[in-house]
Image (cartoon, rainbow, N blue to C red):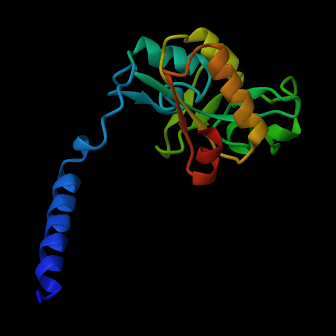
Amino acid sequence: MVHPLYYLVPVLGGYSLSSYYLLKNPHILHKRKKLSFHCRHISHRGGAGERIENTLEAFENAVSNHTDLLELDCHMTKDGQVVVSHDMNLLRQTGHDVNICDVTYEELPRYKESLEVTFFPGHFSSGKDRRIPRLEEVFQRFPNKPINVEIKEEDPELIKKVSELVRRYQRTDRTIWASMKDRIMRLVC
């Protein structure tokens, strides 16, 4: 009678070698997704270090400087408008301690004339445009520009509205969804 290790050792050895080979060569099992764009330069918050963050002026400036992708965050106003703003609470950006979800689009305060760049302390951005834009305006103004849309709060209605805008403006191949929270990404996908 043959000892069971006679069969077990080659099977485990073959499994281990196959696993190692596939780990080092993942393209054998998983084909790389082909993107409709190539991205080497991303304008975070629309180029927050050059213009007031997340304004149409900032996005225009980034595009004129040949950015490959615009990055922005979305929130929803009390009247259901999807707006572009990094923070839900507007104290840092406007000087008014209000949450976007507690005011209508028309009630949104304007950005400060000069806004400190959070990732570059002591550096301030300014610009003529101080209005918080709607996501729809950004999609209309930049129909062919890839955009990374970050969702920060777990709000199914916000996700639904952003998704509807992405489809309406035929941007599914040029829109990247992002979130720090896995639960939000599961709602998106």
Asked if residue 26 shows in the view, the reply is: yes
Residue 152 at x, y percent in the picture? 65, 45
Most extreme residue toward the front, as rendered? 1
Which sits in the foreground, 115 or 15? 15
In the displayed structure, 70 sits above or below 31; it is above
Residue in view at x 17 percent, y 71 percent? 11
Q: Is residue 134 left or right of residue 104?
A: left
- Please identify the quadrant where the N terminus is shown: bottom left
Residue in view at x 63 percent, y 21 percent? 166
Asked if residue 95 shows in the view, the reply is: no
- Please identify the quadrant where the C terminus is shown: top right
Which sits in the foreground, 5 or 102? 5
Q: How many marks?
A: 0
Residue in view at x 55 percent, y 50 percent? 180
Which sits in the foreground, 105 or 127? 105
Q: Is residue 179 left or right of residue 50?
A: right
Q: Is residue 97 left or right of residue 88?
A: right
In the displayed structure, 120 sits above or below 51; it is below
- Which quadrant of the figure has residue 76? top right
Residue 37 at x, y percent in the picture? 38, 20
Residue 91 at x, y percent in the picture? 74, 44
Residue in view at x 38 percent, y 24 percent? 35
